[in-house]
Image: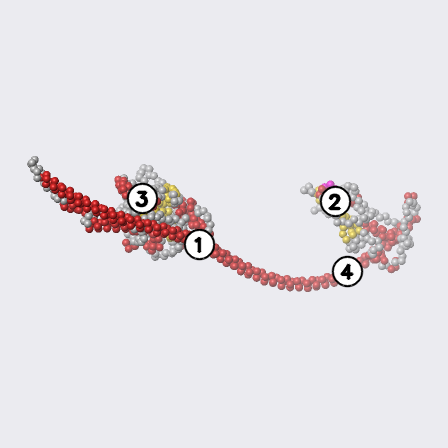
Amino acid sequence: MSLKVFGIKTSQMELFEDVAKPLVDDLIHSKNGLLFTYGVTGSGKTFTMTGSPGQGGLLPRSLDMIFNSIGPYQAKRFVFKTDDKNGMDVQTQVDALLERQKRENQPAVVPKTPSRQRVDPEFADMITPAEACRVDEVDEDSSYSVFVSYIEIYNNYIYDLLEEVPFDPIKPKPPQSKILREDQNHNMYVSGCTEVEVKSTEEAFEVFWRGQKKRRIANTQLNRESSRSHSVFIIKLAQAPLDADGDNILQDKNQVSVSQLCLVDLAGSERTSRTRAEGNRLREAGNINQSLMTLRTCIEVLRENQMCGTNKMVPYRDSKVTHLFKNYFDGEGKVRMVVCVNPKADDYEETMLVMRFAELTQEVEVDRPADRPVCGFAAGRRHKNQAFKDELSRRLEERGGPVDAESTQSVMHQLLQNLPPLPPSEITDPHDDITLPRLIEVLEKRHKVRQMMTQEYNKTAIMLKSMLQDLDNSLASKENFIHDQRGKLGDKDKTIQTQKTEMDRLEKKCKMLEYKIDILQKTTNVYEEDKRSLQQELESREQRLQREQSEKRRMEQRMQSMVQDTKLKWEKECERRVCAKQLEMQNKLWVKDEKLKQLKAIVTESKTQSDQRPRPSREKDRPPAKRSASPSPVPTAPPVRAVHRRSHSAGGERWVDHKPPSNVELDTVMQPALGPNAIKVSAPSEKALAKCDKYMLTHQDVASDGEIQTKLIKGEVFRTRGGGQAVQFTDVETLRQEHPIGPSRKRRSSEGNAAQADDRVEGDWTDVETRCSMAVEMRAGSNLGPGYQHHGYQKRRKP
């Protein structure tokens, strides 16, 4: 569709020239058309369609143009007759005459339309003679008849505005709604709709005005006379070719061509918040808005199917308006829309929606060429027939023959006068022999004259017949030539049609490709914008990364300098602390050596006293104790008996012996004794813990001097509230191995004393044995002096 904007000062004639005149031209050339007005309520749709006195709208101007074009070629009434199935029948002149007489004798329920002599002054001045227009190229070899019908779509129901029912004052009948049907050509029509045959503009407009008075209008907040329904005025033009003589209509229904022009005045869209509609008005507004929304949806789907090449189903059946005009949207004719705009500021939002819809519709193409039946007769039959009649009348005038009925009577009267007059035929005397012979003589003369006239008439008839035969032969040869030319023309038309179809297909393909190119161009622009934004973001991030890297390098340099300073500081501090610790340990070792010397003297004294005492008999079997090479000191104190603590693992409880597979077997003499009931596991097991009371974990690590140190971590097993098992560690035993000839810090401290280096007595061995036993079995928490390591830990209390 093409778009054109008309200003405020545009006249009705200018609007008709651009919008409706091409549709009327197509109507006369057997093509369908649809024209509807669209806009918000109160925007002037009804005025644009109907007009006012002196300013006729689109509808009266269309009617005037139709009748100005086909006026001389109209058929008589009832020659064309509707068949109630959206088709048209053709009757002979005699049947049409009988039909007219039958209609005139019937009591008319519907008042007859006025003739041209009685015109309603309300619409007589709508179109001035200077504004009258007509179609230039009209087929003169066809006869035409115009039928009009007027319907309205109210609350999605179709009503016939021209239907007349007998008035019943007691129980008036409400109007009955009509239904939509589909004819044999798949065109939609209103079944049972009244179609009135009209012969003039005034008669057609009178029919329209009669239906307009029945249309539903109401007073709202926005419009005093607001249309509450969609009105559709249908102009149906039936045309059929004349026969070969050009005198009568061809009696063939297949040759009848029916085209129609629908003029639709859509109800205005409105918002109930502004109109404050209630009750029936609210229901009417909802149905109006719903039907307009369905029309918009159908246009959008058609546009998408044409632009994108899709085949989506168009929802025509959602509304009676779109369902009725389904064929037009599918390409059975041209569609024109007049969008009426109200410049009021209050209607801005609704006007914008209307303009968006108008912008959407201009991209939809629904025009498709219609096939017109070909009669096969020569063109100009009406003109040739009229010329033949004129020539025959002229020749009869030249020969003195009759031209019309009056001339025929005068010629007959002259012929009778040329005959010999009859003598008096009264016989008064039975013996009169003169009257009868004289009458017989006159009659014989008259008979001879009549024979001569008959011979002359026969000669003229034979001559006329030969002339007609010659004309028929020439006409037959011309018809054969025309038929051949028509066949060639048909082939060329098919070729042209094929080329047009190919051109249409290529145009659609080009449009679709252009549309895709536009989409790709837009997509490319979007991607380029994204690329530029991403490049900018990448550059900014690279700059930020460079800044962060430079900052990182500066921080690394600062940290390295700080680390070096801190390292030097702590190295000095460590050296200071090591020197201090060494002094402290030397002092402690000296103290321990002094204590060990005192202990050694005590032990030596106690052994000396025990040797002097008598020993029990059972001590005879004992092997002699190994004596030290050094002399034993004099006993100065009673002997001390070391108290040994029994290991916690020697009890009668059941143990879980947990030894990880990574432990190394040392084969030491001192091994934990857990009893025969102990369960040995290599990984913690809840099932094993449920069967035992004690738990021991054997852990190995490397000591500071490189020897393997074994720790026995022991604990008690108890049940938790959730039904599981838990272990509370209570004690740790440490087993450690040392090489007997390896250097010892304690031994070095003792050897550092130069005064006692050569004084080795038996107490040295005793001192080592005693110290070893006490170091292994020392109780947890004992405080026997510096240098003894505590291997016990107190129990952890439950929180």
Q: Magenta part of the protein: which range? A: 690-694
Q: How crowded is the residue under tag 2: few (<14 C-alpha within 10 Å), some, or many (20+)?
A: some
Compare residues 203 and 85 and report the one nearer the observer: 85
Of pointers 4 and 1, the one earlier in the residue sequence: 1
Q: Is there a contact, CB below 8 Å, between mark 3 and mark 1?
A: no
- At label 4, the amino acid type is Val
Q: Which residue is mark 2?
A: 681
Of the two numbered discs 2 and 1 in the rendering, the one whose residue sits closer to the viewer: 1
Q: Which residue is mark 4?
A: 578
Q: Which residue is mark 3?
A: 251
Disc 3 from disc 4: Cα separation = 135 Å
Of the two numbered discs 3 and 1 in the rendering, the one whose residue sits closer to the viewer: 3
Q: Position of residue 245 (x, y in %)?
A: 28, 47
Of pointers 3 and 4, the one earlier in the residue sequence: 3
Secondary structure at badge 3 equals loop
Secondary structure at badge 1 equals helix
Secondary structure at badge 4 equals helix
Q: Is there a contact, CB below 8 Å, between mark 4 and mark 2?
A: no
Q: Label for residue 506?
A: 1
Of pointers 4 and 2, the one earlier in the residue sequence: 4
Of the two numbered discs 4 and 2 in the rendering, the one whose residue sits closer to the viewer: 2
Of pointers 2 and 1, the one earlier in the residue sequence: 1
Of the two numbered discs 4 and 1 in the rendering, the one whose residue sits closer to the viewer: 1
Q: Is residue 191 visible?
A: yes
Residue occupying the point 35% across, 51% down: 485
Disc 3 from disc 1: Cα separation = 42 Å
- At label 3, the amino acid type is Gln
Q: Position of residue 516 (x, y in %)?
A: 48, 55
Residue occupying the point 92% across, 47% down: 613
Q: Position of residue 128 (x, y in %)?
A: 28, 54
